[in-house]
Image (spheres, rainbow, N blue to C red):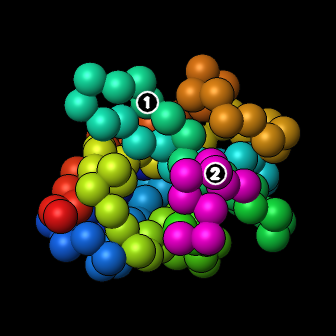
Amino acid sequence: QVQLVESGGGLVQAGGSLRLSCVVSRRTFSNALMGWFRQAPMKDREFVAAIRWIGATTYYADSVKGRFTISRDNAKNTLYLQMNSLNPEDTAVYYCAARAEGLTDYTSSRMDYVYWGQGTQVTVSS
């Protein structure tokens, strides 16, 4: 069983930064697509960013492009999301997610990700 554990959320003022981390408890992936999603109150869970466990290509939602950066450290089995220039619309629970082993095709649909973390709250005050 793969477990994803997020950390790094918190309260920050508008214009500030946070870095989220997601530790993969067991590295079963030779390669897979990893992603970050978020869910604000009363809204659907939405795609934020994705990266392959092996490879440099990254993908972003338009709403975060230029402000957020997804990265990973394979040696530490950790996925990151650096969030800069935060605004109140970024307030949400942020989830780390992974597709099944070997599935590396890009997708922004949450239905295509099978492993999920418990989420970490990010609150941006105005």
**Residue at 71% of width from left, 47% of height from top?**
33
In this view, the residue in front, 58 or 68, is 68
Dot 1: few (<14), some (14–19), or many (≥20) neighbours within 10 Å?
A: some
Q: Is residue 60 left or right of residue 69?
A: right
For the residue marked with disc 1, what is the amino acid? Arg
Residue with the mark numbered 2: 62
Mark identifier at residue 45: 1
Magenta stretch: dominant secondary structure: loop
Give the magenta part as a residue range: 59-67
Residue 101 sits in which quadrant? top right
- On the question of residue 38 being in view, the answer is yes
Report if residue 46 lies within the magenta region.
no
Dot 2: few (<14), some (14–19), or many (≥20) neighbours within 10 Å?
A: few
Observer-side mark, 1 or 2, equals 2
Q: Is residue 38 left or right of residue 80?
A: left
- On the question of residue 2 being in view, the answer is no
Label 2 sits on a secondary structure element that is loop
**Residue at 33% of width from left, 62% of height from top?**
87
Residue 69 picture location, percent across and down: 58, 70
Residue 117 picture location, percent across and down: 38, 42
Residue 118 picture location, percent across and down: 30, 40
Residue 15 picture location, percent across and down: 32, 76
Is 70 rendered above or below residue 2?
Answer: below
Is 46 rendered above or below residue 72?
Answer: above
**Residue at 19% of width from left, 73% of height from top?**
13
Labels 1 and 2: the sequence-earlier one: 1
Label 1 sits on a secondary structure element that is loop
Mark identifier at residue 79: none
Q: Quadrant of the C terminus?
A: bottom left
For the residue marked with disc 2, what is the amino acid? Asp
